[in-house]
């Protein structure tokens, strides 16, 4: 059996670095995701004057974070690189601390919507000004002249962990009550970690509450071994299913808001065994064993299932191309505002290599089969599209040429090496 330990969870890594920057003491975090997005967050935290030491560890980056006297107004533009999580969560942190800052990112990040976090932060009293196009980076956050933020009850149209997290960070750091009532469950790493660090944050289904009465405002320092990223693990499971080789995935996050794709894999016929290993800062840690079926059945996903598997949809689409029948992805229009328009990117690349796929307004219809596939794949700089077609390339009778394989390093620097183990 092939054994893989995926890189540290990207979502947890971002949040651990940000909370360590405002914690009441020295934090040590081991096994951070070592992709470019997490490094962007580390650099931005350093830009606030926080002492962050990073070294290569056995399972990713190990960090020592000393907030000292606390974050300070930066002297230069905070460059978030390609990371939407960095930009959106950092905005909440800066607003909550009452600092001034300018946030920017690369060309891809500048094309992604920001109003979804700017609007609720402005409703809390933040002073935020777009410096270029509306709803886009760069923008400037100005220090509040006086007073605290206002309490907020927010009801977003779309469930979004980044929106929820930005609001929570602002409320927690300024000590003002917030309530976020989402239309469905989004990933809950922020509320789990805040509660583990001592903040009075609680979740009641899709409702998250921060009620500061009686709390001293202190967040505990962090000691954490970051569990593996289930989104990265998804691509490894995909390679197992297409090559017919069982895989053991070790020390991975079993957070229920992140593992919806496993149920889809079971629908396709995979045998998946999950074993609880530990709980770290409120996060369940598991080992998985995935055994492939003789054939892959098609699937139909949409509605409330989408938030728990949004990042894995490119991988599921790639598997659908080798399923025995027609698969559908619905209600996934959020894919259009990721690092690229993933719906269009998937559809156009499928057409290029010979997969019958139809692009819809909010998803895809994919005709699976076993006919040979060949052609050039252009991921448009999107790491998840690159990895999805990398996995598809492990299937029998495929010959895919990849225009930009290196973009996978945004989240999974060892991806191509780990994938090669299924072809040996």
Image (tube, rainbow, N blue to C red):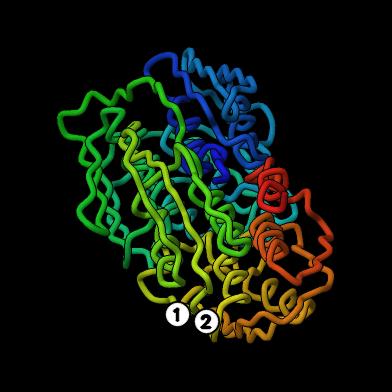
Q: Is residue 96 above or below residue 308?
A: above
* Mark 1 and mark 2 residues within 8 Å of each other at the beta carbon: yes
- For label 1, the residue is 300
Counting other residues with Cα less than 10 Å from the Cα at mark 1, is it few (<14), some (14-19), or many (20 or more)? few
Q: Position of residue 309 (x, y in %)?
A: 46, 62
Q: Is residue 274 above or below residue 67?
A: below
Q: Mark 2 falls on what kind of element?
A: strand
Q: Position of residue 262 (x, y in %)?
A: 42, 60
Residue at image point 38% right, 47% down: 167
Residue at image point 50% right, 78% down: 329
Judging depth in this view, the residue of 114 and 401 nearest the camera is 401
Counting other residues with Cα less than 10 Å from the Cα at mark 2, is it few (<14), some (14-19), or many (20 or more)? many
Residue at the left extreme of this rendering: 214
Q: Quadrant of residue 144?
A: top left
Total labels: the figure holds 2
Q: Position of residue 181 (x, y in %)?
A: 28, 60
Judging depth in this view, the residue of 410 and 417 nearest the camera is 417
Q: Is residue 396 above or below residue 175?
A: below
Give the spatial CA distance, label 1 vs label 2: 6 Å
Residue 117: tell me if it is visible: yes
- For label 2, the residue is 327
Q: Quadrant of residue 363?
A: bottom right
Q: Mark 1 falls on what kind of element?
A: strand
Find residue 416 and name its label.
none
Q: Position of residue 396 (x, y in %)?
A: 71, 68
């Amino acid at each position: 059996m092939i054994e893989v330990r995926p890189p540290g969870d990207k979502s947890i890594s971002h949040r651990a670095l940000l909370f360590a920057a405002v914690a009441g003491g020295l934090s040590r975090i081991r096994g951070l995701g070592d992709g470019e997005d997490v490094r962007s967050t580390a650099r931005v935290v350093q830009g606030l004057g926080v002492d962050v030491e990073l070294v290569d560890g056995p399972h990713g980056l190990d960090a020592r974070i000393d907030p000292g006297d606390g974050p300070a107004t930066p002297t230069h533009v905070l460059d978030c690189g390609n990371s939407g999580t960095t930009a959106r969560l950092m905005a909440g942190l800066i607003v909550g601390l009452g600092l001034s800052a300018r946030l920017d990112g690369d060309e891809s990040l500048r094309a992604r919507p920001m109003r979804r976090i700017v609007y609720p932060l402005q409703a809390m009293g933040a002073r935020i000004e777009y410096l270029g196009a509306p709803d886009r980076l760069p923008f400037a956050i100005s220090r509040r002249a006086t007073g605290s933020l206002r309490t907020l009850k927010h009801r977003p149209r779309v469930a979004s962990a980044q929106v929820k997290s930005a609001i929570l960070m602002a409320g927690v750091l300024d000590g003002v009550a917030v309530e976020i009532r989402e239309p469905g469950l989004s990933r809950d790493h922020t509320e789990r970690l805040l509660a583990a660090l001592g903040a009075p944050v609680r979740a009641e289904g899709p409702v998250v509450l921060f009620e500061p009465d009686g709390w001293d405002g202190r967040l505990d320092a962090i000691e954490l071994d970051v569990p593996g990223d289930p989104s990265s693990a998804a691509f490894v499971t995909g390679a197992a299913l297409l090559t017919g080789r069982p895989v053991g995935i070790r020390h991975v996050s079993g957070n229920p808001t992140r593992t919806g794709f496993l149920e889809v894999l079971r629908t396709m016929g995979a045998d998946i065994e999950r074993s609880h290993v530990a709980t770290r800062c409120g996060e369940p840690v598991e080992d998985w064993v995935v055994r492939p079926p003789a054939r892959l059945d098609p699937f139909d996903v949409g509605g409330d299932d989408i938030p728990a598997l949004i990042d894995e949809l490119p991988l599921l689409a790639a598997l659908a191309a080798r399923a025995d029948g027609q698969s559908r992805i619905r209600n996934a229009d959020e894919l259009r505002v990721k690092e690229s328009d993933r719906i269009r990117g998937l559809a156009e690349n499928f057409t290029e290599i010979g997969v019958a796929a139809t692009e819809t307004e909010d998803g895809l219809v994919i005709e699976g089969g076993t006919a040979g596939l060949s052609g050039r794949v252009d991921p448009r700089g999107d790491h998840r599209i690159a990895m999805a077609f990398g996995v598809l390339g492990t299937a029998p009778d495929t010959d895919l040429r990849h225009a930009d394989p290196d973009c996978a390093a945004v989240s999974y620097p060892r991806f191509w090496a780990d994938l090669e183990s299924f072809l040996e």
